[in-house]
Image (tube, rainbow, N blue to C red):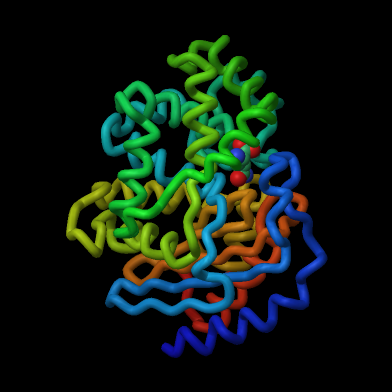
Amino acid sequence: MDYQSVIDKIRDEVRELWGQGRVADYIPALAKVDPRQFGIAVATLDGHEYSTGDAQVCFSIQSISKVFTLAMVTRHVGDDIWDAVGREPSGNPFNSLVQLEYEQGKPRNPFINAGALVVTDRLISLYPHPKDAMLEFVRSLCGNDDIYYDKEIARSERLNADRNMSLAYLMKSFGNIRNDVDTLLDVYCHQCAISMSCVDLARAFLFLSNRGVNPFSGKQVLSVSQAKRLGALMLTCGFYDESGDFAFRAGLPGKSGVGGGIAAYIPGNLAVTVWSPELNRHGNSLAGMAALEHFTTDIGNSIF
Ligand code: GLN
């Protein structure tokens, strides 16, 4: 398969979508990003890599980090996490409070903000230095020791975290948050501010297409069953209230973030990542979703 020609063509096609979405501005530091950027990278399990456009530019991975923290926590606590977080699509925006009250502080899934806050809360209980542990985990997955936290974005989000604090306090009132909320928000805002390129992210997601084994180190990061479950959750919940549409269009397990990134993969085959900062009304990258739809259509391969 000539992946390079496929992604070069997609890069040219998605330009016509520029101007139709909006960069996330509820985190002021994210609003400063130049909207007209697009990168795409493919990493295959047989060791090839392809990229084009702004694929080497680092961006804020935001909610894509929810995959990494869930992987770190399920490794240690196994099925216990499912007592605290559900496994159903929410059908609601990523930062919604409504369902949480009805459902007694148990978030629908680990990929909406409420669910990710519970996962990060457990991570804080597991690791004495959670921020160091997260960076180390992500660095080991992609083999790049230069992955860093964008401190300006972390600070900017922390200063504008009223809604996430509300989610955390509401869940704490139901006994579903164990740590101090300020500590939780500090760690959460840092995980969202991890800065990576499409190329780094494609490498970091390859372990999921490899039955949980990091293809670079040969280490089993997740069991086969845990990797399967993570993929199933990405397919059903990775795009908030647009998860069904992404599955319909791209046919891949994937995870988006409000920085405009999307990471997705084909089991046993490859990881593919895109970045374009303009978002649609669901908070997912407009050109990124279109690019992945084109990608699986053009290569004639998806999980279906
Ligand atoms: N940091 C963002 C927030 O909590 C992450 C949301 C996202 O990427 N969808 O609002």
Query: Residue placed at 68% from the left, 56% from the top?
Result: 33
Q: Is residue 203 above or below residue 65?
A: below
Residue 3 pos. (x, y %): 46, 84
Instruction: For the N terminus, give its image quadrant.
Output: bottom left
Query: Residue placed at 51% from the left, 27% from the top?
Result: 186
Residue 230 pos. (x, y %): 40, 48
The quadrant of the rendered image in which ligand 1 is seen is: top right
Residue 237 appears in the figure: no
Q: Can you name the residue that lies furthest to the left here?
A: 218
Which one is nearer the viewer's eye here, 137 or 84? 137
Q: Is residue 192 above or below residue 267?
A: above
Residue 47 appears in the figure: yes
Q: Is residue 53 above or below residue 150?
A: below
- Within the image, what quadrant is residue 280 found in? bottom right
Q: Can you name the residue that lies furthest to the right here?
A: 20
Residue 18 pos. (x, y %): 77, 70
Which one is nearer the viewer's eye here, 215 or 158? 158
Query: Residue placed at 78% from the left, 60% from the top?
Result: 21
Describe residue 147's horizontal placement relative to residue 214 as left or right.
right
- Within the image, what quadrant is residue 76 found in? top left
Query: Residue placed at 71% from the left, 26% from the top?
Result: 98
